[in-house]
Amino acid sequence: MNKILWPILVALTLSACGTTGGTQATVEDRTGGTAGTTSTGQGTETTGVGGSGVAGNAMGDQYSGDPRKNPASPLSKRSVFFDYDSFVVKDEYRPMLEAHAGYLMSKRDAHVILQGNADERGSREYNLALGQKRAEAVRKALAVLGVSDAQMEAISFGEEKPRNEGHTDEAYAENRRTDVVYSDEK
Amino acid sequence: MLDCPIKKAFVSPMSVSMLRAVLLFPLFCLTLLCAPFSARAAMEIQVIGGAANKIAVAMVPFQAAPGQPNPALTQIAGDDLNRSGQFRLVDVGGAQQPVVPAQVDYGVWRGKGADALVVGQVTAQPGGRLEIRFHLLDVLKQTQLAAYSYTITAGQWRATAHQIADLIYAKLTGIPGAFSTRIAYVQKQGRRYELRVADADGQNPRTVVRSNESVISPMFSPDGSQIVYVSFEDKKPVVYVQSLRDGHRRKLAAFKGSNSAPAWTPDGRRLAVVLTRDGASQIYMINADGGGLTRLTRGSNIDTEPVFSPDGQTLYFTSDRGGSPQIYRMAASGGDAKRVTFNGSYNVSPAISPDGRYLAYISRDGGRFSVTLQELASGQTRVLTDTARDESPSFAPNGQAVLYATVQGEQGILGTVSLDGKTRARLSESGVDAREPVWGP
């Protein structure tokens, strides 16, 4: 993107203070990242770790013509959806996963977290394992495409972070999903 | 209202020492040394059904002292007995209100159908303390079954009521009571999650963890001094162990991948946890201090929700190795697993009764998820509830009831059910979402 605009954007973003105010559009692009990495969601009183840990320069990475943000690129697609009770990565996600594999192999210091999710029906722990199975399916698909294990971590949110909080079949389908989230995009 | 300035801190109740220290007639005074509890938002009890041959108990409200806490001791203890399903409370209205045995006209109480009668009094003592004396009487034999006294602070009011209920329960059923035990659960309000520890009747809740991310799968250590749980605050599931005495906590399992489903061994030295560090969700053992990690199951399918039998010899868990989630058991030392549940295509979340006789679990039948009980020796099963979204069953420490979560009107609530399924009580607080309950010591 435009390198001249870049410092202005950073300044605007930082002055917005809300941290998400100026970044709405971009955040929505990376659909997978929104639920899992909202930094304002941090804060557990037992540790005293509170507030946002987002630093200005970290945010800057998101706005400098990052190919992962190009809406025209399959790299901008971050979610793999699964059928009910299924852990098969469907063929339609092949271009997207090939693009991410290519990016990760070209950038060996890049790291992705594969966040598996499940719908809300049934046991929370079993749903956590189902989400893990979906994350693991995407991890294996990327590994087959040549991505190093050290660049990937498959984790699960189970039913704890539904993108759609409804109780319909459509909501459940939206929540049976693995999101590809880059660590530097947190 | 907790005296302690640290929000996460939790004051351990005195139940065990108190029970041991209680003495039979003649009356002794007992001073309870414990920080005061606080009474908070009310949880209601709804007894839906009940067994036919209940013990009929008449609880005469104790003669009150000026300024004593509310509700009355007999109200709290009566609710406890009522919730168990093993008792019927006799209406004491319109009858004589004796305070000591000498005042009792047994004919009156026999006429009301009472099997047992409880009378007592509360008197104010110097320094704001209260003395409570009560007598449990056999109406038919016209004898005294037990008599006790306590000297307490106002903050020990509810704990004392639960002790009284335990004593009545034990005397009349021959089974130890579980009213002085605690439960833990997760409360969700908006986007805030709180792990709470409350009395077994759901009252007196104390928050031990506050987080903006989900908390699941709490479990008390066998001695009740610690709680283990899974927190998502680190952007992935991580297992924490936290002291209930001072609130200090540490990460027990934070390996690559997901860390979840912790379960203490009965001796409290080790825990089973589910890790994905080697790919699939598999069961591992880890020392309570975080060392000594060993892998227990070796499959490529899901193995999760481990729980130990009371003797520590057997591990029950959920696995999809047969194509659908079912409960299996294996030796705690490892080896082959045997399938335990066979009816239906979804049986998860095993809990084993303290005597090792029963398995409680969640079974799906036609889209309904219900608490189900299996007698392990015979394999016979019984659905205990009539709700459709039950989760997280766990047994009372005396094995006489199962605590579980369910959903009513889009709100998560907690309930208890007797093993015959005939008495269901609701422990609920209006306006909040409660889930992930577990019954502790």
Image (spheres, helix red, strand yellow):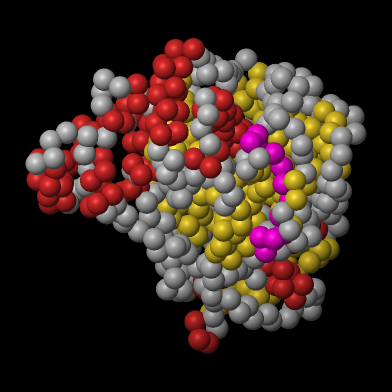
**Residue lying farthest to the front in this orientation:** A106
Residue at image coords 71%, 42%: B283
Residue A50: x %, y % from top left = 35, 59
Q: Quadrant of residue A35?
A: top left
Residue B80 appears in view: no
Is B260 or B161 nearer to us in this picture? B260
Is A95 or B36 nearer to us in this picture? A95
**Residue lying farthest to the bottom in this orientation:** B126
Residue at image coords 71%, 19%: B323
Residue B384: x %, y % from top left = 69, 30
- Let me know if residue B406 is in the magenta part: no
**Image quadrant in which the C terminus of chain A is located:** top left
Q: In the displayed structure, does residue A135 sit left or right of residue B374?
A: left
**Residue lying farthest to the top in this orientation:** A91
B413 versus A163 height, above or below: below
- Let me know if residue B288 is in the magenta part: yes
Is B267 or B29 nearer to us in this picture? B267
Residue B21 appears in view: yes
B376 versus B196 height, above or below: above
Q: In the displayed structure, does residue B268 sit left or right of residue B208?
A: right
Magenta part of the protein: which range? Answer: B279-291
Residue at image coords 10%, 40%: A5
B405 versus B250 height, above or below: above
Residue B68: x %, y % from top left = 49, 70
Residue at image coords 33%, 36%: A34
Residue A74: x %, y % from top left = 34, 21
